[in-house]
Amino acid sequence: MSTDTITCKAAIAWEAGKPLSVEEVQVAPPKAGEVRVRIIATGVCHTDAFTLSGDDPEGIFPAILGHEGGGIVESIGEGVTSVVVGDHVIPLYTPECGECKFCKSGKTNLCQKIRATQGKGLMPDGTTRFSQNGKPIFHYMGCSTFSEYTVLPEISIAKVNKSAPLEEVCLLGCGVTTGMGATVNAARVQKGDSVAIFGLGGIGLSAIIGAQMAGAGRILAIDINEKKFDLATQLGATDCINPKKFDKPIQDVIVEMTDGGVDWSFECIGNVNLMRSALECCHKGWGESVIIGVAGAGQEISTRPFQLVTGRVWRGTAFGGVKGRSQLPDYVERYLAGEFKLSDFITHTMKLEDINDAFDLMHSGESIRSVIHY
Ligand code: NAD
Ligand code: AHE
Ligand code: ZN
Ligand code: ZN
């Protein structure tokens, strides 16, 4: 175990709208209640691209992005008791302290213990562990997995089974858990229900897995990129719909196809117009729509209030409503037991030096997930 500062490679986001730059950074040792982790692999999520684009009101630069990682504990700070050096862990952008009002409520996974400092790119003590030649570099979503080493609060790591390949289960650090979790936590999809999923990236495809496992009778998969339809169908989509093929609003198409609308819908794109479509394709009286997609600064959702008056429900979820420390290890066990596959999602792998290719592949619609191997 090292208590020295480590110099290692990281992809630095120096400013919004510019490619990442792979450079050496210094990673300070963990302070009390913190853990330093060697990242083995990380996925690239659309939210990383969103923040890099400059659309994130909380975007702060220079920063080390990345929040879908898997790694091994390298050293622990004073007072850390829940992990030891060598443990395999998944960083959590939604921590679980177990003692704040939110954790104790039993109603949400949105632990707020360190949310204020996390949103400012800082560790809970208000400082950063990353620097370059003395110049501080900000953390991102409390994770910063685009670095060979990162420092996390103890409450922001989930210890997972060592037999799980970190190159795959890193996807449970965000995308797959978010999509699957949303179908059972934010929504409660039941056997025979109809479901519409808008956007077939890592999140939407995982929502298909969740809906299929819950026994949904009809799963409508919606995307303008038809290359996504094969995997969507393999995972359980019963109907694949390209809105561009219709000359009327997609919500009208779905309402007609489903005898009045779906029981549940999920917006997995981050487009406020499609959030409206997702709400309005829900069945009168009971249909519920879950917003997962993240929309840019200043954007707002709208619909006629009559849509809600007549029984539709609008809700949203972060990290699929999953409590990271107590529930994520079980997702890893279910993956190990063969309940679902992660390899289907990994369309590209690359070294950190090529991380900008991952963003290009995402924007061109070629990839589902790119995974960086360190
Ligand atoms: P992605 O880029 O991999 O997938 C998005 C999909 O949406 C693509 O298949 C794309 O073709 C499709 N799409 C884009 N515009 C469309 C349109 N007009 N009509 C239909 N389909 C369209 O992204 P992802 O990583 O799956 O993330 C999806 C969204 O979820 C992003 O906004 C991301 O920031 C957000 N997200 C939220 C959470 C959360 O906890 N709430 C977690 C992870 C990601
Ligand atoms: N910082 C943005 C919002 C970004 C956002 O909504 N993040 C999601 C996770 S996306 C993962 O890919 C989230 O967890 N939100 C809850 C939270 O507390 O950040 C903004 O609009 O300010
Ligand atoms: Zn994410
Ligand atoms: Zn808490």
Image (spheres, rainbow, N blue to C red):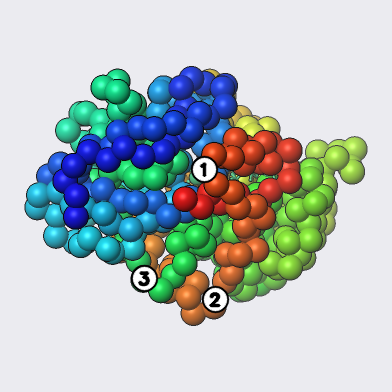
What is the x, y in percent for residue 53?
56, 25
Question: Gap in Å between the C-alphas at discs 1 and 2?
Answer: 30 Å
For image coordinates 52% across by 43% down, the residue present is 352
- Left or right: 273, with 29 as reference point: right
Tell me the number on the disc at residue 94. none
Q: Nearer the N terminus, badge 3 or badge 1?
A: 3
Give the percent coordinates (x, y) of residue 273: 68, 32
Which residue is under mark 2?
339
x%, y% of residue 75?
Answer: 21, 52
- Label 1 environment density (alpha carbons within 10 Å; few <14, some 14–19, many ≥20): many
Mark drawn on residue 352: 1
Q: Position of residue 69 (x, y in %)?
A: 43, 51
Instruction: Name the outermost residue toward the bottom.
Output: 337
Asked whether residue 348 is in view, the answer is yes
Q: Is residue 28 left or right of residue 53?
A: left
Which residue bears the numbered disc 3?
A: 162
